[in-house]
Image: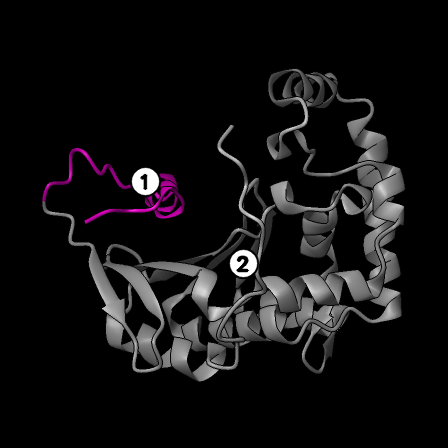
Amino acid sequence: MKISKFVFLFFFCLGFNLQASSNLNIEKVTTKKGFKFLFVENRDLPKVSLNISFKDAGYAYENADKQGLTWFTSLAIQEGAGKSDAKDFAKRLEGKGISLNFIADLEAFRVLLNTLSENLEDAVSLLGDVIMYPKVDHEGFNRALEKAKVNFNNLEKNPYFVAEKKMSMLLFKKHPYSKSEYGTLDTIMNITRDDVLAYVKRNFAKDNIVISVVGCTTKEEVSTLLDKYLSKLPLKRSKVEKIPIK
């Protein structure tokens, strides 16, 4: 079975030794509503980890004047979802011991969810709210903007970040891979609430989603929850210009 780099990294980070575990059973599952996911059942602990990658949605695809949009979106969508504002949403996560993290990668937008098995349905429900119904109200947007400003103040003092940025520019020059995950403070200030909502609508869809699940659950339960809480994702993402090989 061919495993994408996103899925491989997911299993690796969870502590699975893919070379040593010859009996590791990785199942490829398709739900009734067409979601495909890789599944590993592990009963060692009553926990479940779910990884989502939206392909071709990373910061390498950003417009020059909006660089940092992918990363900024990862901040803004944490400011509430569905009918919950930021405070209520955080309280719902904390109350169930659910960890939900968002990562802006070079070529993908990633979502990492970790939860106790008994709270899996609550976790997937909250996940669905975030990626389909992010609140991103004006107060939440401004809070995300303030977080971004603080982040830039810290980054400017980080020699590793400065060196990495210069190295990327030297290695990749005008290639999309030379872009910075965080953009610049000026490009971040160009981003609007509508840009964030448009990014979500454009990039979070069924045809570019990669899902992997590991933990103390069953493939039947996961299938049911994905169909129940993610089925209203758009069928197809907007067309994207492919990154050149050279």
- Indicate yes or no whether the magenta region holds residue 42: no
Q: Distance between the residues labelled 2 and 1?
A: 18 Å
Q: Which mark, by number, is residue 178?
A: none
Would you say 222 lies left or right of 21 here?
A: right
Residue in the picture at 46% in, 80% down: 231
Q: Of helix, strand and loop, which one carries label 2?
A: strand
Residue at position x 71%, y 18% in the image: 166
Q: What element carries label 1?
A: loop
Q: Nearer the viewer, residue 36 or 111?
A: 36
The residue identified by callout 1 is 15
With 125 as the anchor, is 225 left or right in this view? left
Residue 32 percent location from the top left of the image: 30, 82
Give the residues drawn in magenta, as a range: 1-22
Graded by Cα atoms within 10 Å as few (under 14), some (14 to 19) or many (20 or more), the crowding at tag 1 reads: few
Q: What residue type is labelled 2?
A: Ser
Displayed quadrant of residue 163: top right
Q: Is residue 191 left or right of residue 235?
A: right
| Residue 209 position within the rendered picture, expressed as x and y whole percent measured from the top left | 45, 62
Q: Is residue 63 above or below residue 158?
A: below
Q: What residue type is labelled 1?
A: Gly
Colouring method of the image: one colour
Q: Which mark is residue 99?
A: 2
Asked whether residue 20 is drawn in magenta, I would say: yes
Residue drawn 71% across and 83% down? 83
Residue situated in front as seen by the camera: 80 or 173: 173
In the rendered image, residue 119, in percent from the top left (x then y), is placed at 44, 73
Q: Is residue 227 above or below residue 242?
A: below
Residues marked 2 and 1 touching at CB (< 8 Å): no
Q: Quadrant of residue 131?
A: bottom right
Tally the marks. 2
Q: Earlier in the sequence, mark 2 or mark 1?
A: 1
